Amino acid sequence: MPGRNFLFIPGPTNVPQRVRNAFALEQEDMRAVDFPKFTLPLFEDLKTIFQTRTGRVFIFPSSGTGGWEAAVSNTLSPGDKVLMSHFGHFSWLWVDLCQRHNLDVQALEVDWGEGVPVDKYAEILKADRKKEIKAVFVCQNETATGVTSDVAAVRKALDMANHPALLFVDGVSSVASIDFRMDEWGVDLCVSGSQKGFMLPTGLGIVCVSQKALEARKGAKLPRTYFSFDDMMTANDNGFFPYTPNTLFLRALRESVNMLLEEGLENVFARHKRMATAVRKAVAAWGLKLVAKSEKWYSDTVSAIYTPDGIDGNEVARHAYKFYDLALSVSLGKIAGKAFRIGHLGDLNELMILTPIAGAEMAMKDKGVKVELGSGVAAAQEYLRSTAKQVRGN
Amino acid sequence: MPGRNFLFIPGPTNVPQRVRNAFALEQEDMRAVDFPKFTLPLFEDLKTIFQTRTGRVFIFPSSGTGGWEAAVSNTLSPGDKVLMSHFGHFSWLWVDLCQRHNLDVQALEVDWGEGVPVDKYAEILKADRKKEIKAVFVCQNETATGVTSDVAAVRKALDMANHPALLFVDGVSSVASIDFRMDEWGVDLCVSGSQKGFMLPTGLGIVCVSQKALEARKGAKLPRTYFSFDDMMTANDNGFFPYTPNTLFLRALRESVNMLLEEGLENVFARHKRMATAVRKAVAAWGLKLVAKSEKWYSDTVSAIYTPDGIDGNEVARHAYKFYDLALSVSLGKIAGKAFRIGHLGDLNELMILTPIAGAEMAMKDKGVKVELGSGVAAAQEYLRSTAKQVRGN
Amino acid sequence: MPGRNFLFIPGPTNVPQRVRNAFALEQEDMRAVDFPKFTLPLFEDLKTIFQTRTGRVFIFPSSGTGGWEAAVSNTLSPGDKVLMSHFGHFSWLWVDLCQRHNLDVQALEVDWGEGVPVDKYAEILKADRKKEIKAVFVCQNETATGVTSDVAAVRKALDMANHPALLFVDGVSSVASIDFRMDEWGVDLCVSGSQKGFMLPTGLGIVCVSQKALEARKGAKLPRTYFSFDDMMTANDNGFFPYTPNTLFLRALRESVNMLLEEGLENVFARHKRMATAVRKAVAAWGLKLVAKSEKWYSDTVSAIYTPDGIDGNEVARHAYKFYDLALSVSLGKIAGKAFRIGHLGDLNELMILTPIAGAEMAMKDKGVKVELGSGVAAAQEYLRSTAKQVRGN
Amino acid sequence: MPGRNFLFIPGPTNVPQRVRNAFALEQEDMRAVDFPKFTLPLFEDLKTIFQTRTGRVFIFPSSGTGGWEAAVSNTLSPGDKVLMSHFGHFSWLWVDLCQRHNLDVQALEVDWGEGVPVDKYAEILKADRKKEIKAVFVCQNETATGVTSDVAAVRKALDMANHPALLFVDGVSSVASIDFRMDEWGVDLCVSGSQKGFMLPTGLGIVCVSQKALEARKGAKLPRTYFSFDDMMTANDNGFFPYTPNTLFLRALRESVNMLLEEGLENVFARHKRMATAVRKAVAAWGLKLVAKSEKWYSDTVSAIYTPDGIDGNEVARHAYKFYDLALSVSLGKIAGKAFRIGHLGDLNELMILTPIAGAEMAMKDKGVKVELGSGVAAAQEYLRSTAKQVRGN
C-alpha cells in the first residue's frame, strides 16, 4: 500500500527523526559506571519541563496509566478520602483506578464538554472542616472531549479553604504541550506519559512529585513494588534504577527534552495553541461544534468535533482510515459515535495540521456530512499564513 | 524546528519506511559466496520493471547522469551522428554530454512545453538514406517542464524509415512511474535513476540495454572503465561487481522492486496518473497554466506551473520552503522564474498530494498571486474522493 | 570513542537488526480497525513460545518486575500463604515483592549456587494437609548466580502431595533460551521479560497464565489496575489493549517471535546450551569456579564466575568496561565482589561468545588474576569448532 | 540464522552507529536555499582530513574507481606519458584504467609484497630530460597485499629530478587511516573512497586536488561529464552540485568527518597502527608470514597472510564465512589462493580486532593448518593490554 499513514490521534504522536534515531542505538549496560553521567542531568532537565525546582521526577517503564497507579499507591491508603471529578473517558478511568485501590472517592459528575468544577471543589473543600480529604484530583486535559481545566484555580480554592489536601494533576496529554507549572500552582503530583508532548512512543510514565507528596509516602499503606517511589529514589539518587530500565526510551527522552528546551517551553506552548486554533478555525468554517462547550475549556492538544445528527462520527474516523490512510480518533463513552477527534500535539507544523483537516473534509463528505470541500482547509490556511514566521533558510 | 519537511520535488522522492530499513543494515562482504543468491534474482526482477525479457540491466553506483554517460560511452564512438532534441533543462544536458563526448549531435530545438518532435524525427530518419545516424534519443519525461514524450511513436518513425539507429531513452523520471515498455517499443537503451520511481535516495544509475545495443559496444571507441558494460557483464554474470558495489543500495533496491511488483506495475502507473490529475485539477482551479502545452504532453510525475506575470515562481518555491517547510522545485533555464514545479512521483497517496497543493496556495498568496485559498485543494479533494478505493482495514 | 561496545550481561541482550528495524517504524493508531489482525496472531504465536495450548499470554508495558507484580496481584490475596525460596538477588526480590503485597511468605533460604530445594518443597507440601499454601514459586533461572532450577520436579512434588497450589515460575531469564514447558510441567503462571531470550529492549513483561490461575483471579483481593488481567482480557479478546500499548514493542516482538519460530525452539535451546558450554570450557581452562555448585545447576543463559581470593570480581567487570568497552555483569548481594558474570543469551553465535572470554582474560590479568591469556579462548574455540555446522552460503 | 556477521575485509568497513543514523534521515531538496550552509563547511573540513590548505576536495557519487577515472580524465590527454608501478590487484587496475584511457603508460612491474620502487622512479624521472612524463602514480596502500608505499619519498625523487610531473596518489585504503599529507608531500591528486577510513558504505569517490592539478584540467582532452571537475567547481562554489548528489551520504560523511576530527587525526593513525600491530603479533605467533616482505611495507589497514603450502587461503576465508559468519578477504591475482586477508581499518577497538584473529584460527585449524588455537589471540591480547588506555567511565 503506497504512501504514508497520517497519525492525528491525541497520542501516540508523531515521533521526530531526532528522537527516532535514539531507538536505533544498541542496548547498553544499565549498571555501567558512566550511566549516571547520562541519567542525573536528564532527571534535572525534566524538572524544567514540569517547571519545578523543588519537585522530583520519576520515570517508570509504563504508560500514563501506570503513572496514575504510581501516584495513588505511593501517597494514599485504603479508605482515604479523595475529591475527583469526571467529564470524559480518561478522567473517569482515574476515578475507577482510585476506587479499585479502595480509596473513598467523591467523584463529581460533570457534563462532558466542561472541565473541573472549580466552584464546587471550593465549596467542598471549605466544608471539609476536618480536613478529611487527602487529595484533590484535576485532569488538566481530558483527551476524550478536548477540554482543558484550570489547575491554578483549584490551587486557589485549596488555599482559600486553607486546605492541606494534596493536589494531583493528570497531565498526560498536557505536559510539554500546554502550560503546566508545578511550583507556581502548588501541584503535588503530576502524571505524564511519553507518547504525547514528549513526542516518544508509549512506554514511559513520567511523574513529578512535590516534597509534600513525597513525605506522604511514609504513611501510605497501599502495596507497591513496581511503582515504588522509595525503591526509585534509592536507586535514582545514584543515577541508577531499581530494576532494568528501558535505556532506549531514556536515550530518546534525552533527545526529546533537548528538543523541547531548544525550542523553549513558551514557544512550544504557543505553537500548540496556534495549531489548535487552526483546527478550530476549520471546525467553525465547517459549521460544526466542538464538544468543549466554550472557549475557556478549549484544549490546545486535541479537538473533539460533533458530527451532525444522523452522522456517526466514529464512522467518519473509520472511513478516513480505510480510504485515506488517516488516523483520526473515535469518540468514546457518553459521546461515542457523536463526534470524532483530531489530535494536534507533539511534533507539528503548518502543513502537517492541514492534513487531518483536508482528510476529515473528504471523509465527512463521503459519509454524508454537508461540508464544503476545502472550506476548513481555507480557514486554517488563512489563519496560519497570517501568523507564519520564517522557519528555514535564514 | 518542529514538524517535518515536505518534499515534493521531482526527485529525490519520499523513501518508504520499508526501503529505509534497508539502509539500517550493516555492511556486508560483496565477495561473499552467497552474494549472488541475492543479486542474480534482483537483476532478473529489474527486467520486469523495464518490461523486457531480452534486455539486460546494469546497476551503476552513480546518479542518472552517470547512466547517460554509461549509455553513450559503451555504444558510440567519437564522430558518430546522433539525433536528439531539447525542450528543457534535462534533455539539453544530455545533448551537452553527447557533445562533450565528441559525438556529431543533431539537436532539434523544440519549444519548452512540448516534447520530442516525432514528425521531424520521422522526416530526418527518412532522409538519412545512408543510415548515418547511429542513435536516436528520446527524453521520455522532461523533468524541467513536466512534459512526456511518445517513445512508441519514435519507434514507429524508425520502423517506417526502416532505420537501424539505436533508440535511446532517458527514463530517469519516468521508469517505474509512467508506462515504459522496453521490448514492445523496441528501445535499445533506457537510463533510469534510483531517486525517482524507484523510491530510493540518489545513488544508482540503472540502465537497461537491448542485445542490439550490447552488440554495439564491440565497436564503440569512447574510453570507459567505471561505466564499462564489459566489466560489469563479466562480473554480473556470476552475481558480483567489478568494483565495490554499494550493498546498502542494492538491498534497498531489492525492497523497492518488491514493493513495485507487489503493487503491480499497472497499478503503479494508474496511481501516478491519479496523483498527477489531482494536481492538474488544482492548477485549473487556481486559473493557472501548466508549462506543458497540451494534454498529450502532460507528465504524470511532475507538473511545472506558470505563475502569473510579475510573480517570480522561484520566489514562490523559496517562500514555501522558508515559511512552510515545503520543498517545491524551482524552474530552470528558459523558464527560470516563470514557473514552479510540483513533483508527484514515488511513494504517494491522497493526503500526501494535497500537501504541496495547500502549501503552494499559501505561498502563492503570500507572494501576491490572486489565488483563493482552498480552491485547488477542494478541486483535488473532489477528484480524489470520487475516485478513492479502500486501502486499509478490509 | 571508536569501536563498538560489547554487551554480555544477562539482559538486556543484543537486539538483532531484524528486530531493531521494527523500532524504526512510525507510530500507529492502537485503535485502528486492522490492529487486531496484527495482535491476535501474535498472542497465539506467543503461546507456542511458552509451549502451551490452554494458557493465555499477557503483554504488559513494563519490565519483568512488573510481570511479577501482575502475577501476584491478579491471583492472590493479602494473607495468602505462599512457598518460595531464595538463592540469589532475583529470587530474593520476588520474595520481597510478595511480602510487600502482604502475602504470608514461607521463604526457604538456600545456599547461593544451588536452586530450588525440591525435596524440601516436597516435604512442606506433603505436610500441608490443609492445603493452605496457595502458590509455590520457582525461579527457573537465577540471574545472579547462574543457577537453573528444575521446574518439572516441583510439579512432581505438587502432584505427589496431591496439592492444589498454583505453580508460579520466574522465567525472565529462561523463556525462549532454556526449555520451558507450560503445559507439560503444569505451570500456572510464568513471567518473562522482553530483554532476554526475546532479544528486545526492556519494556515488556510477558506473562503466561493457565486457566486455573485465571480462575483464581476471581477471588484475588489485591488491588490492581495497570496490571489487571481482567481489563487486559476484555480488550485483548478483540485484539486491543485497555490502555495505550507500546506498538513499537509489539511490532518488534512480532519479529522476534518470527525469528524464534523460524530457528525452531529446540534449536534455540541447543544453541544456548552450546554457547554456555563454550563459556564453561573457558572457565575450566582458567582454573576458576562457577558460582553454580554443580552441573545440575548450570545455567545456559548466564555464568557467574568466582574470581580468586583477593581479587574483586566487580573490579574485573568495571575494568573490562573502562578499558575494553566490554560490559560484563557485576556480582550482587551475598557474593558481591566475589564473582563476575557473563551473560550468554539471546542473539549469539560463535565469534560473539568468544569476545567476553577474550576480554575477561585481559581484564582479569590486568587486575592480578593469574590467568594465561588465550587459554579460555582456546578451550572455547576447540569446543565450538568441533561442534560447528555450516550457517551460511549453502 | 542467529548472531551477527563479522566483517573484517579491507572495505567496506564497519559503519559506526552515529554515521548509520544519518542514513535514517529523510530525503531533502538538494537545491534548498540552506543547503550550502551544510555543504560548504563540509568541503572545508574534508581538507583537514587530507591535510591540505590549498587543495580542493571533490565528492563524486561513485566508488573509488570512479575517483580514479575523475583523476585521470580531468588532468590528462590521450598519449600523455605516465609513470606507474603495479604490485597488486588494485595498483594494476589503475594501470588498466589509464591504458583504456589511451595514456602512454610506463608501468613498472614490482614483486607482490613490495611497494612503489622509489629508486627506479628516481632514475626514470632523472632520465626524463624532456620532462615528457606528465604524471607519476603512487598506490599508497595496496589493498591486495597489505603493502604501504612511501609517498614522501616519491615527492623527493621528483624534486631531486626537478621534475614537473603531477604526483597522483591512490589513497583509497589509506586516507583517514594512515598518515597522508597532501601539502607537505606535494601531492597533486589523491583519490579516496567512502567505504574505508571514512567508515561509510561504498558510494562516494572523494578526490583531493592541488591547484597545479586543477590548472592541468584546462588542457586535458579526455572526455568527461559525470566526473568533470569544471562542472563540480562551478556548482560547489555555491554549495551545490551539478547533478543530484546523494544527500544521505553527505549527511553521513559530515558525521564521519566529525568523528575523525573529534578523535584527532594523529590518534586515528595511532589507533590503526595499534590494531594492525595486534594482528601482526598474532600472525607471528601462528608462525605464518605476511605477504608484505618487510616491516617498511607493512600496512596498517590490511594484512595479507600467506597460508602454509598446500592450504588454500581462499578456502580458509570461505570456511570462516560459512561456519563462523566471519568475512575475511580472499587473495586475488598472482597470490590467489596462497593467502587470506584481514582488514583492520575504520571503526575498531581491542575486542573487535581479536574477533577475526580468533575466527581465523578456527578456520585455519579446520582447513588443516597446524595452528595452535588461542595462540594468535594470546599474542594480540598481550600487546593490546600492555598498551591499553581507559576509554570509558572516567
Image (cartoon, coloured by chain):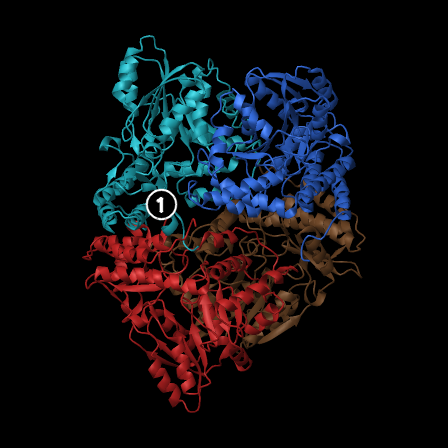
Chain colours: A red, B cyan, C brown, D blue
Instruction: Farthest residue to the top: give it.
Output: B130
User: Where residue C360 sits in the image (x, y, percent)?
Assistant: 72, 52
Please report the residue visible at 40 percent of the width from the left and 89 percent of the height from the top. A128
Q: Give the total number of marks visible in the rendering.
A: 1
Pick the front one: C370 or D107: D107
Which residue is more in the foreground, A259 or C39?
A259
At horizontal 72% and vertical 18% (from top left) the residue drawn is D126
Front residue of this view, candidates D70 and D374:
D70
- Can the viewer see residue A270 in this picture? yes
> Compared to C102, does C86 lie above or below?
above
Q: Mark 1, residues whose alpha carbon is within 10 Å: few (<14), some, or many (≥20)?
A: some
Q: In this view, does B352 lie above or below A248?
A: above
Q: Residue at the bottom extreme?
A: A129
Give the quadrant of residue C338. Answer: bottom right
Q: Name the residue under label 1.
A: A3
From this viewpoint, is residue D71 visible? no
- Amino acid found under the numbered disc labelled 1: Gly
Q: The N terminus of chain A appears in which quarter of the rendering?
A: top left
Say above or below: A254 vs D195. Answer: below
Q: Mark 1 lies on which chain?
A: A
x, y percentage for residue C288? 76, 55
Horizontal arrangement in the rendering, residue A131 relative to residue D200 (left or right):
left
Check disc 1 and report its element: helix, strand or loop: loop
Q: In which quarter of the image is residue A94?
A: bottom left
The image position of residue D183, as x and y in percent, is 65, 34
Q: In the rendering, at what x and y percent does residue C200 appear? A: 53, 54
Question: Is residue D229 shown left or right of residue B376?
Answer: right
